[in-house]
Image (cartoon, rainbow, N blue to C red):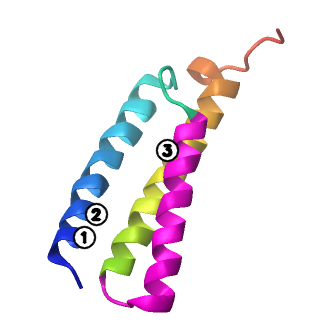
């Protein structure tokens, strides 16, 4: 287990609740990239798979927790792009 890896995951994990909270308060997804969030989510999944097969330790929980937070943020982004302001978006 690397204390530096754990510290990195804790710092990253602290940022996602802020992003989720902002999306819930504003009910908007302006400025968020779905592709970026999907790439971050894939990165956490790959880190978790690596930990599972090569270095199982408690940091795996941080990968899973951070991945879940990114998945929530991505789901909110997708939802608010389809339903801005809590209303259905009109067809383009």
The image shows a total of numbered marks equal to: 3
Q: Find residue 11 and report its image quarter.
A: bottom left
Magenta-drawn stretch contains 15: no
- The answer to whether marks 3 and 1 mark residues whose Cβ atoms lie closer than 8 Å is no
Front tag of 2 and 3: 2
According to the image, label 3 marks what residue? 73
Front tag of 3 and 1: 1
According to the image, label 2 marks what residue? 9
Identify which residue is drawn at 30% across, 40% down. 18
Mark sitting earlier along the chain (2/3): 2
- Tell me which segment is drawn in magenta: 34-58
State which quarter of the image contains the N terminus. bottom left
Q: CA distance from mark 2 to mark 3?
A: 17 Å
Residue 32: x percent and y percent? 49, 29
According to the image, label 1 marks what residue? 5
Give the dominant element type of the magenta stretch: helix, strand or loop: helix
- The answer to whether marks 2 and 1 mark residues whose Cβ atoms lie closer than 8 Å is yes
Residue toward you, 18 or 12: 12
């Amino acid at each position: 287990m690397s204390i530096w890896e754990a510290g990195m995951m804790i710092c990253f994990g602290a940022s996602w609740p802020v992003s989720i909270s902002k999306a819930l308060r504003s009910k908007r997804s302006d400025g968020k990239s779905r592709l970026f969030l999907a790439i971050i989510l894939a990165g956490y999944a790959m880190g978790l798979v690596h930990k599972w097969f090569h270095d199982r330790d408690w940091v795996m929980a941080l990968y899973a927790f951070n991945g879940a937070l990114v998945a929530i943020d991505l789901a909110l982004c997708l939802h608010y792009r389809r339903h801005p302001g809590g209303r259905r978006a009109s067809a383009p």
